[in-house]
Image (spheres, rainbow, N blue to C red):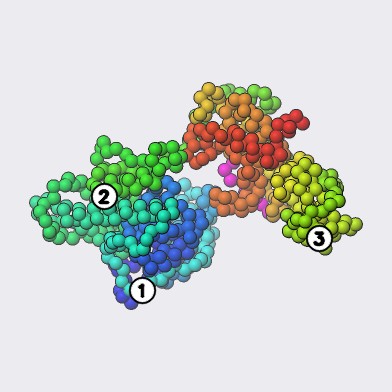
Amino acid sequence: MLSVGYPSQNLARVVVWEWLNEHGRWRPYSAAVCHHIENVLKGDPRGTVVLGQVDPQLAPYIIDLQSMHQFRQDTGTMRPVQRNFYDPSSAPGKGVVWEWENDTGSWTPYDMEICVTIQNAYEKQHPWLDLTSLGFCYLIDFNSMAQTNRQSQRKRRLRRRMDLAYPLTMGSIPKSQSWPVGPSLGQPCSCQQCILVNSTRAASNAILASQRRKVYAGTNGASGTLTIVRQSNTFAGTTLWSAASSVSSSSAKPEQVQPPGALSTFPRLPPPPAPTAVSGQNNLNRPGTQRTAIVSTRGSIPPGVPALPVKNLTGSGPVHPALAGMTGILMCAAGLPVCLTRAPKPILHPPPVNKSDLKPVPGVNGIRRKMKKKQLRKGKNPEDVVRRYMEKVKVIPDEDCTICMERLATASGYDGVLGHKGVKPELVGKLGKCGHMFHFLCLVAMYSNGNKDGSLQCPTCKAIYGEKTGTQPPGKMEFHVIPHCLPGYPECKTIRIVYDIPTGIQGPEHPNPGKKFSARGFPRHCYLPDNEKGRKVLKLLIVAWDRRLIFTIGTSNTTGESDTVVWNEIHHKTEFGSNLTGHGYPDPNYLDNVLTELSAQGVTEESLKD
């Protein structure tokens, strides 16, 4: 259960660090990240935490402990963070994590408050749990390990797993909302990351100093009293919104104190109405109340205030996004009105198109290609394939074989590993096109470990011998022209490619034969300009599709899911009307880049003559 107030000097508590997402919900960092933050906190309470040191996926993020904000260095996005406390016998103290399965098939952890509630019900052997009291219309069934939406009746799987326990702390907790402002120790580094870190810290100092000035200058009418807010059980930093946002917390209690100076002449915005508190719950961390607080605070921004765009993912603006973010902070500190804008959403699809408006691509036969299940080509002996592309070498140079890393003048490192009779382990040959030399047995071993499709690829220069094919699972590819223009190509229409691959069972050429593979995000829509070069790229993509080179089965770089259909090193543009993700237009170099990628797979203009 959540702690109330502040732990006494000898009371142990589990520490969970959380960040505020765009929906007003506090999301917990992992236990490993929290341990890292606590270690930095012990060494320097005013320091900066580089999250990428413990989790590579968080490489762009840092936490400034002085302002209690998470800062993304490439976009300038800042989010409040807080330090929350739980009982050691609760879920985070035991390392228990409850997660639900999202639409991509990966697992998402619940908010920590919900995780604690689920674990309590689980330990008491309740058959089910209603999350309505926490602001969610979900029903948890422990027998089927499923979450049911009470409105839509949609079910999702959930799971309980064990992880590292969250860090334990003893003693009192600072009652201030942020760390004391003071000069940092030591000489700062001059690298780019440290420059951003120190710039963020300078902005934090400005915020806190400005807030101190407002505390002593701001008054409440003619009574000469001032409203100060203290948080009951969380240790959070200042927000990027107006001072009224801190009043909106339902667990905050105002105290009336006498200001040291005269009445302030600064204009003050009326505080938004506070959400109704729910007895017995920690309302500061409840998603509903957080969302209400943020919306109310944003509503207090007067009309006509110019918006300062912080997120500039494309880098097309005149100001670096990180500098834009820090500028917004400094403007807030100076008392200037600033409204932080949300990032624009990518335009993934074109406007609706009637079926009658879909036209064939000029110069391309048909509108569809199907790929049925193909078995591996049999009858191709690995030794015969290698001999086809290899020439014997009479004078062996004094260098290493780049496959086994043994000297070419000595026996192959695969001697005794492969049972090829009649082949001398010292036999050395060179590939016909590029002339690179290898042990014969080493090339046989390399071929046997690949797709065994009759082609060979030089491990040194990647030159392809024969026709390279891939391991793309069965599916279909459609292509047609739609009457809309891509950004950067206003003079021509657009070629739309639609790939559709269903789930299935992995074959012998795949990583885990006999195991089911998933196919997320299909059908996938991709776009090319309907000009001469765009049609050329389409023709080569059709060849790559027929050779099973567009997709493969592996691990997704986006979700981390294994045994799923992923792109195979040939980039496609999946964003129609923008380029916020890097997979859209305008991109003047894309067509040339994709031609290079196709050539690296052995798909060139020569392939169109076959």
**Label 1: which residue?**
170
**Dot 1: what SS?**
loop
User: What is the quadrant of residue 285 in the picture?
Assistant: bottom left
The answer to whether residue 62 of the structure is visible from this angle is yes
Q: Is residue 329 left or right of residue 352?
A: left
Label 3's element?
loop
Q: Nearer the viewer, residue 187 or 569?
A: 187
Q: CA distance from mark 3 to mark 2?
A: 72 Å
Residue 515 on the magenta span: yes
- Residue 410's label in the rendered image is 3
The x, y position of residue 435, in whole percent, is 77, 45
Q: Position of residue 73 (x, y in %)?
A: 42, 50
Q: Position of residue 439 (x, y in %)?
A: 80, 54
Residue at the spot 37% in from the left edge and 50% down from the top edge? 78
Label 3 crowding class (10 Å Cα cut-off): few <14, some 14-19, many 20+?
Answer: some
The magenta segment is 514-522
> Is residue 28 something one can see in this rendering?
no
Q: Secondary structure at mark 2?
A: helix
Residue 401: % across, % down: 75, 55
Assess disc 2: are there few (<14), some (14-19) or many (≥20) residues with their C-alpha within 10 Å of its C-alpha: many
Q: Amino acid at mark 1?
A: Met
Q: Dot 2 corresponds to which residue?
A: 333
Q: Disc 3 or disc 1, which is closer to the eye?
A: 3
Instruction: Tell me which residue sits at (74%, 50%) in the image.
Output: 450
Measure the C-alpha gap from mark 1 to mark 2: 34 Å
